[in-house]
Image: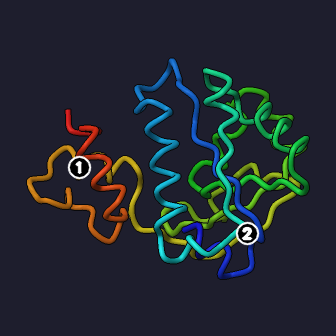
Amino acid sequence: MIAELINQNILQKIILVPCGNRKDKQLTDGLHRYKMLQLLVETKDQLKNIDSVFIDDYELQNGQLVPTYYLLQKLREKYQNVHFVIGSDLVNTLPNWVEGQKLIAETNFIILNRSSHKIEQITNLPPKYELVQNFEYGISSTEIRKRIKNSKTEYLDCLGVLTPEIIEYIKVNNLYRS
């Protein structure tokens, strides 16, 4: 997905921000998520020679979840022309996010129009957005975790979805198996 956003000239720079630890969700420790992003950026053929993909560990350094509105404020201080990439399936939920109305009003969005949630179904489009038509990645993080948990294969049923390095990291650290 990251390489495709660059390939289509939608973004020139991508900042990946691993989510901080959350009280409302049971997530894998932030350090593991950070290390998997590092492996992705360092080893994925489409990304390893691209100097425009960065990882920002602001939330992890903060020690807890930073609501998106406040996170974007911090990122705007550090980087120029920040856009928030979001799937069309989440746009209607934005008013319910912390500072949702401010987030909608002040943020430049890039909306990935997914076939399961077409733009026509969105009742509350933000004022500043760019639409990427028919952007399908084909698998969600929930589905990946499910595959890993139920897998009996060496590649955790994720070959082609995750890099071999990330699969090995997951196995060595026994992530998502229980």
Task: Indicate left or right for 76 with 93 as reference.
Answer: right
**Quarter of the C terminus within the rendering:** top left
* Picture mark count: 2
Residue 131, which numbered label? Answer: 2
- Residue drawn at 46 percent across, 56 percent down: 39
Q: Residue furthest top?
A: 23
Which of these two is toward me, 138 or 77? 77
- Residue drawn at 74 percent across, 52 percent down: 84
**Quarter of the N terminus within the rendering:** bottom right
Q: Amino acid at mark 2?
A: Leu
Characterize the local packing of mark 1: few (<14), some (14-19) or many (20 or more) Cα atoms within 10 angstroms. Answer: many
Q: Is residue 39 above or below residue 113?
A: above
Q: Is residue 52 above or below residue 71?
A: below
Characterize the local packing of mark 2: few (<14), some (14-19) or many (20 or more) Cα atoms within 10 angstroms. Answer: some
Which of these two is toward me, 58 or 2? 58
Q: Which residue is mark 1?
A: 148
Q: Position of residue 154 (x, y in %)?
A: 14, 59
Q: Mark 1 near mark 2, Cβ–Cβ under 8 Å?
A: no
Q: Position of residue 51 (x, y in %)?
A: 70, 69
- Residue drawn at 80 percent across, 40 percent down: 72
Q: Earlier in the sequence, mark 1 or mark 2?
A: 2
Secondary structure, mark 2, is strand
**How far apart are the two marked residues, 1 and 2, measured between alpha carbons?**
32 Å
Q: Residue furthest left?
A: 152
Secondary structure, mark 1, is helix
Q: Position of residue 25 (x, y in %)?
A: 45, 26
| Location of residue 113 by image quarter | bottom right
Give the label, 1 or 2, closer to the camera.
1
Q: Position of residue 125 (x, y in %)?
A: 77, 54
Q: Is residue 120 above or below residue 74?
A: below
Q: Amino acid at mark 1?
A: Ile
Task: Indicate left or right for 53 with 126 as reference.
Answer: left
